[in-house]
Structure formats: structure tokens, C-alpha cells
């Protein structure tokens, strides 16, 4: 089993920044790819960014490119999502997820373990 715990969400004004953290524990060989998804009320869960634990290769959705950065600290078993220039449209519950297959995917169905989510609210 893999456990994922997100933190760092909150309320921020438009143009502000937040850094989300996802602490991972459990079977390390089961979490080749770490990703962030988000889900706004009434909308489907959407891919935000992903990173490979081993190579550090990243992938990012077009909607957040240039504003959000995903990174990892292998020693701390933690993945981060640095979010800058936040917009009201970024308001959502942000989820950390991991998959056992060593290739990134933008589909939530391809991820095996999920955190409980952390709320991010951006006011205008």
C-alpha cells in the first residue's frame, strides 16, 4: 500500500502563490509517477502536473504551464506543487496521486493511489 498526505492548501488572492506538499509513504516501488490533479465543483477531475520519482521528468497541463512547477525531494519522499500567479479559475480541491506504471498519464483512471485532497481557493 501507498499512503499520500497533501498539505498547503488555503485561501489566497488572485496573483498570489501557494505551495502544496504531498508526503508519500509505503511501497516505494509502487509509485513511479507522482501527479497532481484538481477538481472544481461540478467539474471532472483534471490533470495538473506529474513527475517521475527516478528521473525527475515532468509534465504539465497547458492551463498551468509557466505558473505551476512540480518538484520532488526524494530524501523526504515528498512532492511539491509551487503555484504562482494564481487565478480564481484555479480554485479546486487538489489531489496527489501515484501510479505503479513508470510513464506519465493525464488520465485519473491510470492512477492507483490518491490522497484525501486539499482545498485551494483563489479570490478575485
Image (cartoon, rainbow, N blue to C red):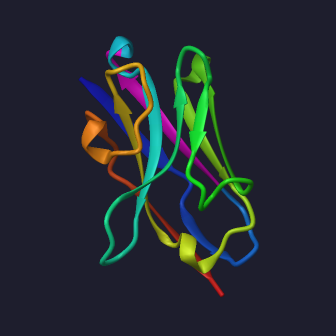
Residue 15 occupies quadrant = bottom right
Image vertical order of residue 61 relative to residue 112, above or below? below
* 20 w.r.t. 24: above or below: below
Instruction: Tell which of 74 and 35 is nearer to you.
Output: 35
Q: Quadrant of the C terminus?
A: bottom right
Residue at the front extreme of this rendering: 62
Give the x, y percent position of residue 113.
28, 35
Q: Is residue 25 left or right of residue 42?
A: right
User: Residue at 63% across / 58% down in the picture?
Assistant: 64
Q: Residue at x 34, y 76 (%)?
A: 41
Image quadrant in which the N terminus is located: top left
Q: Position of residue 13 (x, y in %)?
A: 69, 79
Q: Is residue 46 above or below residue 2?
A: below
110 vs 91, left or right, is left
Q: How many marks?
A: 0
Look at the image and give the residue range highlighted in magenta.
Answer: 19-27
Amino acid at each position: 500500500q501507498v499512503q499520500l498526505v497533501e498539505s498547503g492548501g488555503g485561501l489566497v488572492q488572485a496573483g498570489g502563490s501557494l505551495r502544496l506538499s504531498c508526503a508519500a509513504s509505503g511501497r516505494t516501488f509502487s509509485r513511479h509517477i507522482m501527479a497532481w490533479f484538481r477538481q472544481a465543483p461540478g467539474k471532472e477531475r483534471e490533470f495538473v502536473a506529474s513527475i517521475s520519482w527516478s528521473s525527475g521528468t515532468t509534465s504539465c497541463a497547458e492551463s498551468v504551464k509557466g505558473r505551476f512547477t512540480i518538484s520532488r525531494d526524494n530524501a523526504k519522499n515528498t512532492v511539491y506543487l509551487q503555484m504562482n500567479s494564481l487565478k480564481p479559475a484555479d480554485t479546486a480541491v487538489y489531489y496527489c496521486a501515484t501510479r505503479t506504471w513508470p510513464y506519465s498519464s493525464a488520465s485519473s483512471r491510470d492512477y492507483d493511489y490518491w490522497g484525501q485532497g486539499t482545498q485551494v481557493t483563489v479570490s478575485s
